[in-house]
Image (cartoon, rainbow, N blue to C red):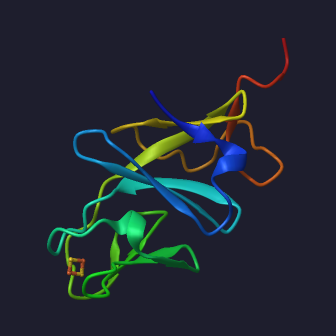
Amino acid sequence: MFPVCRLEDLPEGEAVRIDTEPPIAVFHADGELYAIDDTCTHQDAALSQGWIENCQVECPLHGATFDLRTGHPTCPPARTPVRTHRVEVVDGVIHVLPGAPTPAVAGAVGAAGIPVAGEGGPG
Ligand code: FES
């Protein structure tokens, strides 16, 4: 589990790259957090440097778009999906679990719809 940054340090509409191998980009879009591989599957561009709109990121090099929820390309020239990764917020800090499948429905959901762990709960 990789710590990324505090939740308040990643405003809506922004992205941050973490130097995992391969690098992962974490996006804050539409009130949710998403993590996908940072490298575009078309060539070698950093998706964290792209434009975010409607839960999609547009590659800054040739304009392919990827769905942040699924990693699937939604506009050419990219044709291969990027991997998605699970994101959790633990005590106000965003964490990425590389390779962990993205849960369809999170157990605990924060005020912005973001899965939250380690902040209260039953027990
Ligand atoms: S490198 Fe991303 S679309 Fe070409």
Which quadrant is the N terminus positioned in?
Answer: top left
Of residue 57 and residue 110, the one placed in the foreground of this image is: 57
- Residue drawn at 68 percent across, 64 percent down: 12
Asked whether, in this view, residue 48 is left or right of residue 62, the answer is: right
Ligand 1 picture quarter: bottom left
Which quadrant is the C terminus positioned in?
Answer: top right
Asked whether, in this view, residue 118 is left or right of residue 28, the answer is: right
Up the image or down, 30 lies above or below 98; here it is below
Q: Position of residue 27 (x, y in %)?
A: 53, 59
Please indicate, yes or no, whether residue 67 appears anywhere in the rendered image: yes
Of residue 8 and residue 31, the one placed in the foreground of this image is: 8
Q: Position of residue 13 (x, y in %)?
A: 62, 69
- Residue drawn at 24 percent across, 70 percent down: 45
Q: Residue furthest left?
A: 43
- Residue drawn at 30 percent across, 84 percent down: 64
Q: Position of residue 74 (x, y in %)?
A: 36, 82
Q: Position of residue 37 (x, y in %)?
A: 32, 55
- Residue drawn at 65 percent across, 58 percent down: 32
Of residue 25 and residue 108, the one placed in the foreground of this image is: 25
Query: How many labels were placed on the picture?
Result: 0
Please indicate, yes or no, whether residue 71 appears anywhere in the rendered image: no
Asked whether, in this view, residue 76 is left or right of residue 97, the answer is: left
Q: Residue furthest top?
A: 123
Up the image or down, 36 lies above or below 68; here it is above
